[in-house]
Amino acid sequence: MSRFADESIEKISPYVPGEQLADRKYIKLNTNENPYYTSATAVAAIDGEQLLNLKRYSDPESRKLTEAIASYYGVDVDNVLVTNGSDEALAFAFYAYCRKGVCFADVTYGFYEVIANLFGCPVERIALDADFKIVAGNYFSKAKTVVIANPNAQTGIALSADDIERIISENAGNIVIIDQAYADFGDFNAISLVGKYSNLITVNTFSKSRSLAGARVGYIVADRELICDLKKVKNSFHPYNVNALSSVLATKAIEDDEYFLFCVKKIKATREAFSASLTERGFEVLPSSANFVLARHPSTGGRTLYEELKGKGILVRHFSDERIADFVRITIGTDAEMGRLLAAIDEIIGE
Ligand SMILES: *Cc1c(COP(=O)(O)O)cnc(C)c1O
């Protein structure tokens, strides 16, 4: 730390993203990206004129994209705020609603802890049960902001629609943030509850199910009063938060429903087949509703498996958090990639 930095900087432990290595060509199954390319109609919408017009600022309200999102979900444009990735959406929501206190699971998306620390939000961690499940009843009447990733990050396990709704209705006096980064790979989207609950904030992203991780586009769908609060934060931090090209890409991507449905269906099918293949090999695989699985082998530890796979040119994710240190998290890639991964696993566990 430099002698100029505020002392609070010393205490920060920033988020550690999955590796983006370039020392060799890897099969990359470590950051839950979509293995399928960005929608071709989205890419085709970027033309020379758009590039030349980068001399102009982007639309600070991202109107076209906001309208496309609102129309896709059948909500009003006043219910939508577009952000620079959903991490920015989380940052705005934590700034607006979590500084008196926030609670989330002991195993979940690591960014929650990081952003809470940055903004000085007191954190309560609520333990998953022995099966790595969120127990809905542990989140009732919290009198502080509740944050739930559904399906949950790292485990892939989803709560039922009923449990999600109970958590929202049992916290009428405070905000409930549902992070839906993986919702498109499951069976339930909480945006359907936005009209019914004025304390619900859904945080959504184009990064995973819509193959646009590099474009950095996320969005909040919530009650219009909450969107007003969050717009104030956004306009005090980064008025032109979404760049012009990403806005066009995301608008076209959400309009290309056919390709989206194809990718999601394919990834879900690959996930089911791959989970069965791991189970056959003796792995314990948590039941995933996401585009990744968390799995452990009875004799090969998580760290070892991660390292050996890396040596074979396949990147998966290992977390040193005590509760999941035995596991690796594997992003669902193409069938061909999963086949190569299984062959590598056979070499490693057969040794
Ligand atoms: C990937 C992820 C995000 C962040 O996605 P962005 O790329 O910033 O939109 C947010 N929440 C969870 C649970 C994630 O896994």
Image (spheres, rainbow, N blue to C red):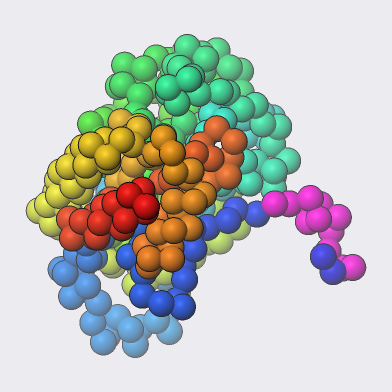
Residue at coordinates 53% horizontally, 40% vertically from top-left?
325
Label count reads: 0
The location of residue 15, given as percent across then percent down, is 60, 53
Q: Can residue 231 be seen in this view?
A: no
Q: In which quarter of the image is residue 78?
A: top left
Residue at coordinates 33% horizontally, 49% vertically from top-left?
350
Residue at the farthest right position: 3
Quadrant the N terminus occupies: bottom right
Q: Is residue 259 above or below residue 81?
A: below
186 sits left or right of 79 in the view: left
Q: Is residue 24 visible?
A: yes
Q: Does the magenta stretch include residue 179?
A: no
Q: In this view, does 46 lie above or below 15?
A: below
Residue at coordinates 35% horizontally, 57% vertically from top-left?
29
Q: Quadrant of residue 151?
A: top left
126 sits left or right of 197 in the view: right
291 sits left or right of 258 in the view: right
The location of residue 343, given as percent across then percent down, is 25, 56
Identify which residue, 193 or 259, lies in the foreground: 259
The region drawn magenta spans: 3-13
The location of residue 8, given as percent across then percent down, is 81, 52
The location of residue 284, given as percent across then percent down, is 35, 32
Identify which residue, 344 or 84, lies in the foreground: 344
Q: In this view, does 297 lie above or below 101?
A: below
Residue at the farthest front position: 351
Identify which residue, 45 or 225, lies in the foreground: 45
Q: Is residue 6 magenta?
A: yes
Residue at coordinates 79% horizontally, 50% vertically from top-left?
11
